Image: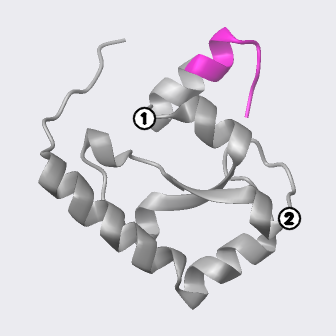
Amino acid sequence: MDHFIIEVSEQEIKRERDKSRDLRRSRWWQNRLAQGHCHWCGGTFPAEELTMDHVIPLSRGGKASRNNVVPSCKDCNSKKKYLLPMEWEDYLNQNGKTE
């Protein structure tokens, strides 16, 4: 599969990270964490074990907005890194895991 490449400046990434910090403090995000579900593996976790994951990573042109962030367990988030959803799905399929 061809990788989607987009050039994103460090300044744009910093701006979006700042927005992410603000979003993490919102009541909306706290409610998402309280549900306790990892978007990627479907596992149930305490809120403090979930992280904010950008579906479209900031480094790939994603934005810090409600429609681009999901709760993710630390394991899924660290494995997904900068992958797009379709690349993540390919990764899971290659490693014998399904969503």
Q: 79 or 67: which is nearer to us?
A: 79
Which residue shows up at 28% across the image and 39% down it? Answer: 60
Q: 58 or 39: which is nearer to us?
A: 58
Residue 29 position in % (x across, y down): 59, 77
Placement of 30 over or under 56, stated as above or below = below
Mark 2: give few (<14), some (14-19) or many (20+) Cα within 10 Å. Answer: few
Provide the residue designation for mark 1: 84
Placement of 2 over or under 61, stated as above or below = above
Mark 1: give few (<14), some (14-19) or many (20+) Cα within 10 Å. Answer: some
Placement of 57 over or under 23, stated as above or below = above
Which residue shows up at 42% across the image and 34% down it? Answer: 82
Determine whether, in the image, residue 6 is placed left or right of residue 64: left
Verify CB contact (< 8 Å) between mark 1 and mark 2.
no
Comes first in the chain, label 1 or label 2: 2
Which residue shows up at 59% across the image and 89% down it? Answer: 27
Q: 40 or 48: which is nearer to us?
A: 48
Is residue 92 highlighted in magenta? Answer: yes
Quadrant (top left/top right/bottom left/bottom right) for the C terminus: top right
Dot 1 lies on which element? loop
Determine whether, in the image, residue 81 is placed left or right of residue 48: left
Is residue 27 highlighted in magenta? Answer: no
**Range covered by the magenta-colored residues:** 91-99
Provide the residue designation for mark 2: 46
Colouring convention used in this rendered image of the protein: one colour
**Amino acid under label 1?**
Leu
Which residue shows up at 72% across the image and 38% down it? Answer: 75
Residue 72 position in % (x across, y down): 66, 52
Dot label at residue 24: none
Dot 2 lies on which element? loop
Residue 66 position in % (x across, y down): 44, 72
Indicate the quadrant where residue 70 lies: bottom right
